[in-house]
Image (tube, rainbow, N blue to C red):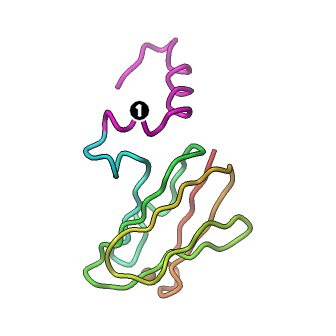
């Protein structure tokens, strides 16, 4: 999607107000289109750091050839952590702005963050 320069600000505002509707038209399926996806693979979160707008859903997808991981919220701002698992997904919708940090408690150094604007 491209916009003429003068209309870019308006387009960004529209994206922030209705991320699901906008992304649904561009996404490959409804689930992935709802927000950002972080894949757990090679003992890492990919990408480790994401920035999203308020109201966006982050989906963590466990896809590391049978290796168990979890998503554990840490730090000042918290969100719902996942259980330990090797497959499947964990979804969280972020409604408040801030920096949310998380780790996998099974693997030292496996960490990430979600910045919500
Ligand atoms: Cu892990």
Q: Position of residue 53 (x, y in %)?
A: 57, 43
Q: Which portion, as a residue range, is magenta?
A: 1-26
- Image quadrant holding the C terminus, namely top right
Check disc 1 and report the residue beneath it.
22
Q: Quadrant of residue 103?
A: bottom right
Quadrant for ligand 1 reads bottom left
Q: In this picture, is 86 found above or below 114? A: below
Q: Which residue is painted at 66% across and 57% down in the image? A: 99
Q: In this picture, is 79 found above or below 27? A: below
- Asked whether 113 or 90 is in front, the reply is 90
Q: Which residue is painted at 43% across and 13% down in the image? A: 4
Horizontal side of 58 relative to 100 (left or right) equals left
Q: Position of residue 100 (x, y in %)?
A: 63, 62
Q: Main secondary structure of the magenta part?
A: helix
| Dot 1 alpha-carbon crowd within 10 angstroms: few under 14, some 14 to 19, many 20 or more | some
- Identify the secondary structure beneath mark 1: helix
Q: Position of residue 32 (x, y in %)?
A: 34, 51
In reply to whether residue 16 is colored magenta, the answer given is yes
In reply to whether residue 48 is colored magenta, the answer given is no
- Image quadrant holding the N terminus, namely top left
């Amino acid at each position: 999607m491209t916009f003429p320069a003068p209309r870019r600000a308006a387009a960004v505002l529209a994206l922030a107000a209705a991320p699901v509707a906008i992304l649904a038209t561009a996404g490959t399926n409804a689930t992935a289109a709802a927000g950002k996806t972080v894949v757990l693979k090679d003992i890492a979160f990919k990408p480790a750091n994401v920035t999203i707008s308020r109201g966006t859903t982050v989906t963590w997808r466990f896809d590391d050839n049978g290796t168990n991981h979890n998503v554990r919220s840490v730090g000042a701002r918290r969100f719902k952590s996942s259980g330990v698992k090797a497959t499947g997904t964990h979804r969280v919708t972020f409604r408040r702005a801030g920096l949310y940090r998380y780790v996998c408690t099974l693997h030292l150094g496996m960490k990430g963050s979600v910045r919500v604007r």
